[in-house]
Amino acid sequence: MAIILNDNIRINAGKPSESKYLSSTNLPYSGSTLSAALSAVTTAISISERYLGLTVLVTTGGSNIEYWFKEGVQNANLIEKKFTSEQLVGDFITGATNLGYFSGTTGIQWLDISGSGFGSDVGAYFSEYNWYYVDGDGNIRIGAPTYNGPFRRGYVTAVRDKSWVWNVSTAQWEISLNDIAANVGAAAIISPHTGYVFTGATFSGSEGTASASTTAYGSLTTGNTLTIGYPIYKDKSDQDLHFRTIINDTPEFLKVQTDENFIHFSGVSSVITGTNYGGGIGVFSGKTGSNLKFRTLIASGDTSIIQKTNGQLIVYSSSEGSANAITGATNIGTGTTVYSGITNRNLYFNTFVGSGSTSISKIGNEIRIFSCTTGDACYDLASPSAIPVGGICTGTVLTGKTAFQLFEELLVPELCGIITEPNITSVGLTHSGLYEIDCNISQTLAINFSRGCINPQYCSISDKRSGTPNAYCFCGPEDMPIGFQSCTALSASATDASYDVVIGTQTWGGCVRYNVGSPALSNKGNQYCAALGSGCTSTSNNSIIGVYPLYATTSTITPPLTQQILQNMSTANNVLISLVTESGGNKQKFQIPCAWLGAPTNKPLVGVCQWNTVSSQWEYPGGSAGTSLALWTTSSATETVQGNSVGYCQYTHNGVDRSAVCIRLVF
């Protein structure tokens, strides 16, 4: 029962009125750690002696802190006693600053400092694009000063060895003997000179005993808006500071991670630009945003450019097989010169012309010079030939040739080979023909290429019409490589590992791109067909056809019906179905997919033919297509095709028992 007193209590001892407030030694509860000190409290005071609001004094880290049982009397309810209804009158957060963040105009101001008191500190100082000040500790800072006025830019010399900066301690502009922009956070090195500080938000007037003056040029408030940095701090609501969240929009280039103390950014360095080293035409053209631009390499003359199949090499080659360009030729010895001159890489030679009893002829790779003697006179009668004889064509010039040359013209005619252009010899598919709709297959497309031929080769450099292939293009319903795929082999393939067959024809194919070929030469070395330029074959295809299966009474008259051999309804005008003899009450039946009778084939069934073994021909029972179809009763049915339930139209014979081994459906 509470004791009622008419006045308060005064205790003469230096102890609290609640003995449990201190430990048994009349000192705060203590321990080697805070946890140990709190354990000392709960050990000394049993739960039965605790009450809500019971307060104790605990010492930790050299400081005495009150703890109390605020919400309960269990050990876990012992918490630090903090102010709730009263505010501390000391320092508290009123906002935040984004250090280094700047948003202002692009205007520039520069100051012309002069005067006898400035010594070596005279000269031009140019404004920076950020807010600078020297704090109370003498350190250079960016942002808004915590006191003494508005934002102010700093001023730095052109060589960046001295700076004008606002000092919040002295409330004056002062010179720092270093670059404030490069020494943020470091101490400002204030010039030892005195008597030339300037007051105010901007420079004006002069002070001190030394002569000092300044002239300002430009403006800090003109131009476009310039923003440096991205502010993390947004605003404040009551005691809550609001900060923006860092989001990574390009995780493939920049990785953001956090731990207890840091936000980590890591990734590849951005490409700023490129440099063309050495002389000649530069390959690097320029950069737009993040897109690097390079000039394209184009072959010219007898030079070709090839990208190797591994994609890592670009090879320059000359069709002449030489790495060095021809710069000229030399006539060795005396006499009439054969070499005439050169234009670019084209050599010019003087032409041999026979004169008198001397004749010149070209036989294959040989130039033959022949002079007629007394016993081997040259032909000097009528010319040219009026009729073809042997290898001599009409209009051939005969004069000036010896008898042996005429015999050669007659007996050894100029022959040319047969030209076959490059082509695709075959387009192979792993699967071809008819397949059930929705069947899943792995389809490999193989393309075989022929370079063509020159047959017989005779004097041609190669018996092939084209050069080697350089790329294959594959096409198909889905999952084929896009565009040309580099390949120099005579065959190439691509695979669709999982393809679901659809109804109708599905086509795979492709074409082949090839390099330049060689000219075709006759047996006498004359060109009769120019070299084939680089090009591409026409497209060749192969296909499969997706169909629904048919069902009929083939092995037994009673259901279920047996699946028939796959047949192509999209092209055939009739379909054969095998049946067996009816007996008793059993009736012959067959089923046609509803999709065949309507879209996409639109080929409705119009009649049912029966094979007449006597006349050996197909006949309509009843004499007409309509009468034959009337002998069958139509009903609905379903069949499971590749795991899917498919609607079918079922036809049941409604006549008397009949014998048939095969019928033909007419559409």
Image (cartoon, rainbow, N blue to C red):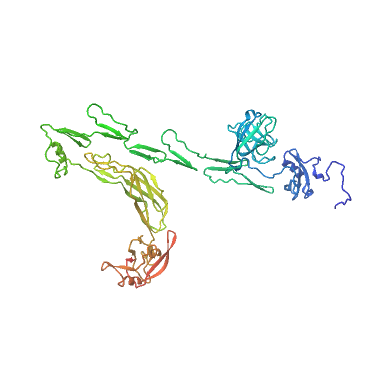
**In terms of image quadrants, where is residue 209?**
top right
* Extreme-top residue of the structure: 333
Tell me which residue sits at (22%, 37%) in the image. 364
**In terms of image quadrants, where is residue 656?**
bottom left
Q: Does the rendering let one see residue 187?
A: no
195 left or right, relative to 528: right
Instruction: Looking at the picture, tell me which residue is in the foreground, 237 or 418.
Output: 237
200 left or right, relative to 484: right
Image coords of residue 505 (percent x, y): 37, 57
Instruction: Looking at the picture, tell me which residue is in the foreground, 373 or 519.
Output: 373
439 left or right, relative to 166: left
Image coords of residue 347 (percent x, y): 28, 34
Tell me which residue sits at (44%, 59%) in the image. 643
Compared with residue 394, is residue 569 higher up or lower down, i.e. above or below? below
Compared with residue 266, is residue 573 higher up or lower down, i.e. above or below? below
Q: Does the rendering let one see residue 517?
A: yes
**In terms of image quadrants, where is residue 31?**
top right
Image coords of residue 657 (percent x, y): 34, 72
* Extreme-left residue of the structure: 375
Tell me which residue sits at (21%, 39%) in the image. 524
* Extreme-right residue of the structure: 6
Image coords of residue 358 (percent x, y): 16, 33
Tell me which residue sits at (14%, 38%) in the image. 399
Instruction: Looking at the picture, tell me which residue is in the foreground, 272 or 638.
Output: 272
Rendered-image quadrant of the C terminus: bottom left
Compared with residue 513, is residue 501 higher up or lower down, i.e. above or below? below
Number of numbered discs on residues: 0
